[in-house]
Amino acid sequence: MPGMSPERNGGPARIITRARLPFLGAFPVKNLPVLAVLAGLAAPAFADDWPQWLGPKRDGYWRETGIVDSFPKDGPPVLWRQPVGMGYAGPAVAGGKIFLPDRYLADGENNPANAFAKTAVKGKERVQCLDEKTGKPLWKFDYDSEYRISYAAGPRCTPTVDGDELYHLGAMGDFYCLKVSDGSVVWEKHFLKDYEATLPVWGFSSHPLVDGDQIICLVGGAGGKGVVSFDKKTGKEKWAALTINNDPGYSPPVIFEINGKRELIMWHTHAVVSLNPESGKKNWQYDWEIQSALTAPTPRLVNKTQLFFSSFYNGSLLLDVSSGSPKVIWKSKSKGGQAAVMPDNTVDLHSIMPTPVIAGDHIYGVCSYGELRCLELQTGKRVWMTHEPIAGKSVRWGNAFITPHEDRYFLFNEQGELLIAKFTPQGYTEVSRAKILEPTNKMALGRPVVWSHPAYANKTMYVRNDKELVAVSLKK
């Protein structure tokens, strides 16, 4: 599909991927074809890990080749299933290992019947390391974690794997650097205790970002420590920036190259902010008050100097930052509130969790009631919408995670189904659909759902519900 490439649209510049061939080191993906020829490789298909939130380039694109065009009648082959605890966090895959956070309750404890309640519930958070090929457990690390958050069904953040270290952020702000080899603690921080952070209503959900020798976190700490950079080897604070009053929000930090310089984009409850990633110094700020702090989707850079955002209540925003300061290209007319997100009242895109995809001159994303929508990029005008990929009807918070691959898309919906589909400005076409997992989380107004982003690595999809992690082969 024309315009599908994130490089054309100005995707993230930083790469923390590693080919599955030890002599290639950490070369960028764009160099792999040349290296393959030089090395005399026999295999024509490219395989890659999924070492962090949204994959190797933190943009949600799956770049492997040799992937199925459609599913067999009985669905893709299941390689293995492994019991796990509850959680929303998706897995990370790196170096032949899978890393998955989960949670289990203390004896006699139960999660509140009301998903919105912030009742104290005792339990432990855990990081499991599994063998990628078999699912066999290799090690585990756990710690006490008393939840006081809404939707208390486990950790939210996909781990970040960087060389010999693994970085894990729990729902209550417990931040650990662990050794990949055995799960031992290298260093740790606790955002509530160490930074007097405000506890987000739905728990800490902003995936940390490794950048060079630092790891950057949305902390929400007091005294100008809303965003903190830590030395990734020692945990020592390198810089801190921003005062963020109340709930800091959930959007992960991202670094884009804009106008020839690297900019750290932080979207929090009150503003979109550009920081210098080396120092934390502010470049510019666009004030934007977000209802209920719902800043979950990852920002998108398009056309090298435009930034796109989408929020459940507030709708969407496209900024032009070509001049070094933000200017609104278009902004949703939504005034917030419950009525604003009703299907008949939404005009553009009101995403609650999944990150929209931008292909050429169009935006594709999931709106407030489970509608897959296509919008014109430069105007926000709706081109088409369909409920077909998710529930077939309008459902509040209806969800599907969209992963572009070559000229089509993989969608994993909240009913545990994996779809292959094509989107164009002319409409939606489903190619194939298969049931992968049973939905087990019943906190979405009582209907069971799976709200966990898959990992696509080495021609396999790894995805979890609250009971098991499953590996399915997507190899052609």
Image (cartoon, rainbow, N blue to C red):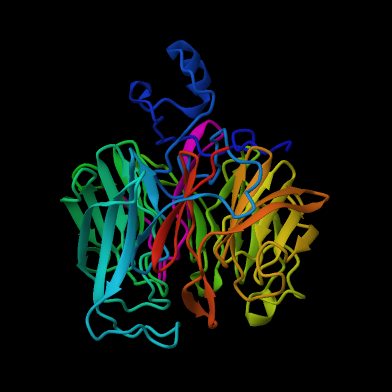
Q: Is residue 244 visible?
A: yes
Image quadrant holding the N terminus, namely top right
Q: Residue at x 23, y 79 (%)?
A: 106
Q: Residue at x 53, y 83 (%)?
A: 446
Image spot of residue 32 (x, y percent): 49, 23
**Magenta-drawn segment:** 238-266
Q: Is residue 314 above or below residue 212?
A: below
Relative horizontal placement of residue 33, taking residue 103 as reference (left or right): right
Q: Nearer the viewer, residue 386 or 322?
A: 386
- Name the image quarter holding the C terminus: top right
Residue 225 in sight in this render: no
Q: Position of residue 299 (x, y in %)?
A: 55, 52
As drawn, which residue projects farthest toward the front? Answer: 74
Q: Please, is residue 9 above or below residue 81 in the view?
A: above
Please tell me which residue lies in front, 294 or 422. 422
**Magenta-span inclusion, residue 264:** yes
In the displayed structure, does residue 26 sit left or right of residue 188? right
Residue toward you, 67 or 356: 67
Residue drawn at x 34%, y 71% is: 198
Q: Is residue 268 magenta?
A: no
Q: Position of residue 152 (x, y in %)?
A: 38, 76
Position in image of residue 343 (x %, y %): 73, 74
User: Number of marks in the image?
Assistant: 0
Image point (72%, 68%), residue name: 333
